[in-house]
Amino acid sequence: MDFCGLSFASPLVLLSGCVGFGEEYTRVAGFSNRQVGAVCLKGTTGDPRPGNRPHRIYETPHGMLNAIGLQNPGVDHVVDAILPQLDFDETRFIANVSGSTIEEYIRVTERFDDSPVDAIEINISCPNVKEGGVAFGNDPDMSARVVEACRRATRKPLITKLSPNQTDIAESARRCIEAGTDALSAINTLMGMAIDVERRRPVLGNNQGGLSGPAIKPVALLRVHQVYQVARPHGIPIIGQGGVTGPEDAIEFLLAGATAVGVGTGLFYDPLVCGRINRGIADYMARHGFERVSQLTGALELNG
C-alpha cells in the first residue's frame, strides 16, 4: 500500500515507544515476516533525557497507564549509533520527534532529515512530560507553529501526532494541514491517573500519564472519524490508533477513515499479533469483495 509516497508491506504501523528504537522489533522470531508496514521509533529529543521517576507503567482495566517521560539517548546518539544498526530493507522506519521548545523540534527534525529514516512523526501531544508536547498539542496555534517550523526543516514526509485531550481535534487537524503536514496520526494517549488508596498517593511517579489500550478505542474511533472529515478533501492520510488488539479493531479504524493502523499496547499482550491482524483484514476483504485496503478507508456508512 502507499502512504505519503512510501510503499508499505502492510497497513500496520508499530507505534512509537512500543518497540524501542527497532532493536526489540528485530530480536523476536516471527515478529515481522513482512507483516509490518512501518515502525515508529521511540520519541527522541535534542539532548538525552532520563525520563520520569518510577513508577512509570501501571496496568488498568482494559488498558495501561504510562509515564515514561520521553527517556531517550538524544538525537545525535540515535542517528550516529542506532540507525546504522537497523535493517531498512526489512520495513520502513519513522523517526518520532519531541521537544520542549520549537527550536528543539527544529534541531531534532533537521538531524533526522539528514539520516536514512523514511519519514518523521512530530509528537506534539505527549501527556506524560511536564513541559512541551502536551501544551503544544492542545493549542491549535502552537500546533501549527511547530508543524510549520518542522516543515521548513525537512524534505521527508511529515506526520503530525494529534492529541485527543483538546476541545476540537478537527480544528487542530485543519491547522496542521494548512501548516504543511503530509499526514496525521490519531490519537495519542488520553490523560489519566491511578491512585494507591492505602498510601493515598498517585501510583505513577509523574502523578499522571497516558492511558492506552482497548479502553480508549471508542474515543479513538470517533476522533479518527472527525479528523477524516477534514483530511479527506486534502488527500491527507491518517494513521488510526488506540486499542487495536485484533483484526476487527483494525478494520474499524480503516472504515472510520484511517489509511494505516497503529498497533501499540496490543504488542505487550501478543508480540506476534500483526500476522493475525493482517490475515483477518485479508479475510474481511475477500468476504466483502474489496480488492485493496485503500477501498476500506472511510467506507463507513452512517445511520440516518
Image (cartoon, rainbow, N blue to C red):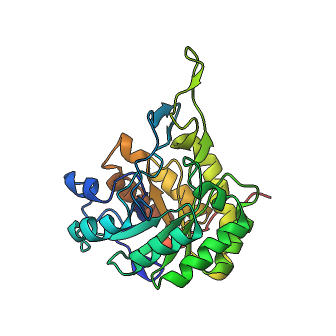
Residue under the point 48% across and 61% down: 261
The C terminus: image quadrant = bottom right
Residue under the point 25% across and 57% down: 23
Seen in the picture, residue 120 relative to 137 is either above or below; the reply is: below
User: Which picture quadrant has residue 108?
Assistant: bottom left
Residue 303, how many percent across, how many down? 75, 57
Position of 86 with respect to 47 (left or right) is left
Q: Nearer the viewer, residue 131 or 12?
A: 131
Q: Nearer the viewer, residue 12 or 193?
A: 193
Residue 144 seen in the figure: yes
User: Which picture quadrant has residue 55?
Assistant: top left
User: Which picture quadrant has residue 235?
Assistant: bottom right
Residue under the point 65% across and 54% down: 164
Seen in the picture, residue 245 relative to 238 is either above or below; the reply is: above
Position of 227 with respect to 286 (left or right) is right
Q: Nearer the viewer, residue 77 or 182?
A: 77
Residue 292 seen in the figure: no
Residue 94, how many percent across, how many down? 40, 69
Residue under the point 55% across and 17% down: 199
The N terminus: image quadrant = bottom left
Q: How many marks?
A: 0
Residue 176, how many percent across, how many down? 65, 73
Q: Residue furthest right?
A: 304
